[in-house]
Amino acid sequence: GDELNQPGLPGLLENLAIQAGSWGACHLLAEVEENSPALELVRLGGFNVYGRQRIWQFTNPLRGVPALEWQPAAPSGENLARSLYQQLVPPLVQTAEPFAPGKQRLLFRLEDELLAYAEINTGSQGIYVQPIIHPGAKDIEGLLAGLLSRLPPTNLRPVYLAVRSYQAWLDNPLARLGGQSAPQQALLVKHLA
């Protein structure tokens, strides 16, 4: 991360694209802080901005916050999650990040209607969550608190929530829940085929 502003970055990105193409990849994705000098170098490397996001970090478990319950996704919930994705995610984002079946997801339903889902990726450095929440959902703070309580952070593994610009209305509830916001990032894609 410290070397992203080096003049050799475009050459490195081109070689990564060649290698990824030989593996059959159709595109490369990048996330770069908007105020970073590397953003222009990445764009010169053939990447185009398709969105923006803010990452929220939670390191302490939520206490005393009313929470709504999320459930693990069953195979039958996959089509519902895909439908919600197609309704809420802009087409430009869908071309860069198509809905991927088989991921670990939590679902929130109210009276048999899917109002939200969250994709969960876990690793040694933390838990990365990308929620998709219908704007018609009520009690957003309780909804987010329920999601966070299903993924309690520990001292070793914080929880990171990625909030895309088309879901920016989640920022205020996340701040009220005690999240720490990182600088806004540009989401970039380089199509290889």
Image: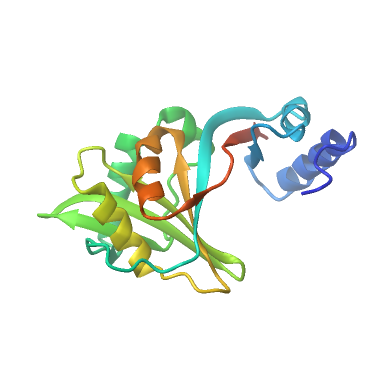
Q: Nearer the viewer, residue 128 or 44?
A: 128
Expressed as whole percent of the image width and height from the top left, the position of residue 90 reads 40, 30
Expressed as whole percent of the image width and height from the top left, the position of residue 37 reads 77, 31
Residue 86 lies left or right of residue 28; in this view the side is left
Expressed as whole percent of the image width and height from the top left, the position of residue 24 reads 67, 47
Count the marks: 0
Residue in view at x 58 percent, y 74 percent: 156
Can the viewer see residue 3 in this picture? yes
Can the viewer see residue 74 in this picture? no
Quadrant of residue 155 in the image? bottom right
Residue 23 lies left or right of residue 129; in this view the side is right
Residue in view at x 79 percent, y 39 percent: 13
Q: Nearer the viewer, residue 86 or 141?
A: 141
Residue in view at x 71 percent, y 31 percent: 39
Q: Nearer the viewer, residue 104 or 75?
A: 104
Quadrant of residue 31 in the image? top right
What colour scheme does the image use?
A: rainbow
Residue 95 lies left or right of residue 80; in this view the side is right
Residue 15 sits above or below residue 180 on the image: above
Q: Quadrant of the C terminus?
A: top right
Expressed as whole percent of the image width and height from the top left, the position of residue 33 reads 65, 38
